[in-house]
């Protein structure tokens, strides 16, 4: 009886060994699926390109897409732990850290030139101070929205109540201006370029005069703790994507242009090229990130939009980018 059992075990072992040799090798660790949030304006398009480039698949990373009109909505999804990773500018990141402990794992781009204040062309307005008494479309709670209400408007002598803030998603603002339901908009690319190209609006300033507006890839602390290997592999993909932006811009432009035209936006190649050209894509983790965010945090604290200045040693995680670069 014992001999038969021993013989059967040896046969099973030999069969299992043969099967193992026939199957492809499996990595010692498996990467986790990423729930990727991104905004559908021009700020989110580097992330969109990454998702469509095939670079993540090459490294064995699976992902789910969560597209929203504005980055502050991605931030809110992350605070609610519905999304693992997402991009938005410094103001939204600071609020996200305050509300949900979100951390920055890379700076992806700077977009100050892509954010502009546009007025209806027929009103012949040329200064921010002239918005007094007018209806201004603004994505309340977004980074551009906060910069406009907290910094730009006060600097132009506009107090709360001097203009009527009309809460609206950025992707609905051009049609609102065309219908003359608003007089101006605080918007980003490609929407303001469409308004200008179609003769609807006139740009009176861009935000780079006030803030270069770095856009960060943020992560939930839960995902960082659970999946550090996945994040490092993910950031390696960003390094490869950065080379495409630098060395193969036509390929990148084709992917992003196709996205906007698929959504029904009538936009010439020339207009699109101008819009995309204002986005400075250079993924990394600059050493001066904390000092820039400190200024933003002080304004947000003054306006009672956060409870405290973040501890930057907790909010910023440059070590993950360093591992991806080694």
Image (cartoon, rainbow, N blue to C red):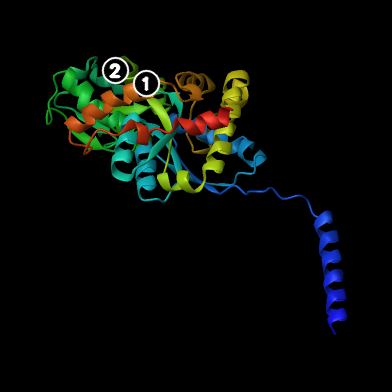
The residue labelled by disc 1 is: 112
Location of the C terminus by quadrant is: top right
Percent of width and height locating residue 313: 36, 32
Would residue 37 be seen by someone viewing this image from the given angle?
A: yes
Q: Quadrant of residue 149?
A: top left
| Residue 273, above or below 19 | above
Residue at image location 18% in from the left, 36% down from the top:
304
Q: Secondary structure at mark 1?
A: helix
Q: Of marks 1 and 2, which one's residue comes earlier in the chain?
A: 1
Percent of width and height locating residue 96: 33, 40
Q: Nearer the viewer, residue 122 or 165?
A: 165
* Mark 2 nearby-residue class (10 Å; few <14, some 14–19, many ≥20): few
Residue at image location 39% in from the left, 25% down from the top:
214
Left or right, 281 with respect to 102, comes to: right
- Checking the image for residue 210, the label placed there is 2
Q: Quadrant of residue 142?
A: top left
Mark 1–mark 2 distance (CA, rounded to whole Å): 8 Å
Residue at image location 22% in from the left, 27% down from the top:
298
Left or right, 203 with respect to 306, comes to: right
Give yes or no for contact between labels 1 and 2 (Cβ–Cβ under 8 Å): yes
Percent of width and height locating residue 153: 19, 23
Percent of width and height locating residue 67: 45, 43
Q: Secondary structure at mark 2?
A: loop
């Amino acid at each position: 009886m014992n001999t038969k059992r021993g013989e059967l075990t040896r046969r099973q072992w030999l069969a299992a060994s043969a099967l193992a040799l026939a199957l492809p090798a499996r990595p010692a660790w498996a990467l986790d699926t990423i729930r990727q949030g991104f905004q559908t304006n021009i700020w989110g398009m580097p992330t969109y390109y990454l998702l469509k480039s095939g670079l993540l698949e090459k490294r064995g990373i699976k992902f789910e897409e969560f597209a929203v009109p504005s980055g502050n909505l991605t931030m809110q999804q992350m605070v609610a732990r519905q999304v693992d990773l997402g991009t938005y500018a410094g103001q939204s990141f600071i609020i996200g850290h305050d509300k949900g402990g979100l951390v920055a794992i890379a700076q992806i781009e700077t977009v100050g030139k892509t954010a502009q204040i546009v007025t209806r062309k027929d009103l012949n307005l040329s200064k921010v101070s002239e918005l007094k008494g007018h209806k201004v479309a603004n994505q309340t709670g977004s980074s551009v929205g906060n910069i406009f209400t907290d910094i730009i408007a006060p600097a132009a002598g506009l107090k709360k109540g001097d203009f009527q803030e009309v809460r609206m998603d950025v992707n609905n603002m051009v049609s609102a201006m065309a219908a003359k339901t608003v007089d101006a908009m605080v918007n980003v690319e490609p929407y303001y370029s469409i308004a200008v190209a179609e003769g609807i609006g006139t740009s009176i300033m861009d935000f780079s005069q006030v803030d270069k507006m770095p856009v960060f890839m943020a992560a939930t602390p839960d995902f960082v703790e659970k999946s550090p290997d996945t994040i490092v592999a993910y950031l390696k993909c960003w390094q490869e994507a950065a080379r495409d932006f630098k060395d193969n811009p036509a390929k990148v432009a084709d992917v992003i242009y196709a996205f906007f035209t698929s959504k029904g936006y009538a936009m010439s190649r020339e207009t699109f090229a101008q819009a995309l050209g204002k986005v400075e894509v250079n993924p990394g983790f600059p050493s001066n990130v904390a000092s820039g965010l400190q200024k933003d945090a002080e304004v947000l604290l003054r306006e009672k939009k956060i409870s405290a200045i973040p501890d930057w040693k907790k909010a910023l995680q440059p070590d993950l980018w360093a591992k991806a670069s080694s």
